Image: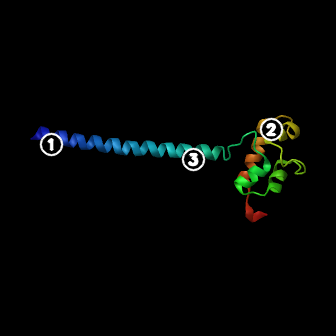
């Protein structure tokens, strides 16, 4: 009888350990994903254009052009790759940070 009770209690303990351990791992993965998104608020690709980013993030394109210090005239169909080569001397990190900062700092109440 005591042996059966010990096996049952051990089984219940094992089930609870697996259940709560799984929940802890799931929570850890969610937190890690959120932290990764905070460090890199916007996933940018070279093919993206300012009008695309404007529409995707609901930010006026004039604001984005002003924030990255690029003239809006004739650049609506230009990709971030083109803007990097022609306005940032090929510095990929500078333009990506400028666009990410502009999107992260956008506050519709200030305009």
Residue where numbered disc 3 is placed: 34
The residue positioned farthest toward the front in the image shown: 77
For the residue pair 7 and 47, the one nearer the viewer reads as 47
Q: For the N terminus, which image quadrant?
A: top left
Q: At x 56% / y 44%, what residue is drawn?
A: 33
Image coordinates of residue 97 in percent, x first then y, are 75, 43
For the residue pair 56 and 108, the one nearer the viewer reads as 56
Q: Secondary structure at mark 2?
A: helix
Residue where numbered disc 1 is placed: 5
At label 3, counting other C-alpha atoms closer than 10 Å, the crowd grade (few under 14, some 14-19, many 20 or more) is: few
State left or right for residue 99 relative to residue 24: right
At label 2, counting other C-alpha atoms closer than 10 Å, the crowd grade (few under 14, some 14-19, many 20 or more) is: some
Image coordinates of residue 65 in percent, x first then y, are 83, 51
The residue positioned farthest toward the left in the image shown: 1
**Residue 106 image label:** none
Image coordinates of residue 24 in percent, x first then y, are 42, 44
State left or right for residue 3 relative to residue 28: left
Q: Secondary structure at mark 3?
A: helix
Report the Cα–Cα distance between label 3 and label 1.
44 Å
Q: Which numbered disc, 2 or 1, marks the residue that appears first in the sequence?
A: 1
Q: For the C terminus, which image quadrant?
A: bottom right
Report the Cα–Cα distance between label 3 and label 2.
28 Å
The residue positioned farthest toward the top in the image shown: 90
Residue where numbered disc 2 is placed: 81
Q: Which numbered disc, 3 or 1, marks the residue that appears first in the sequence?
A: 1
State left or right for residue 7 relative to residue 31: left
Q: At x 83% / y 34%, what residue is drawn?
A: 90
Q: Secondary structure at mark 1?
A: helix
Q: At x 75% / y 50%, what residue is drawn?
A: 52
Quadrant of residue 59 within the rendered picture: bottom right
């Amino acid at each position: 009888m005591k042996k059966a009770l010990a096996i049952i209690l051990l089984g219940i303990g094992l089930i609870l350990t697996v259940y709560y351990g799984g929940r802890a791992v799931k929570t850890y993965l969610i937190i890690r994903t959120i932290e990764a998104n905070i460090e890199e608020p916007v996933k940018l690709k070279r093919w993206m254009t300012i009008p695309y980013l404007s529409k995707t993030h609901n930010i006026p394109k004039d604001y984005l052009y002003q924030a990255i210090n690029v003239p809006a005239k004739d650049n609506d169909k230009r990709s971030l790759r083109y803007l990097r080569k022609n306005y940032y001397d090929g510095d990929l990190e500078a333009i990506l940070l400028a666009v990410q900062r502009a999107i992260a700092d956008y506050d519709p109440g200030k305009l």
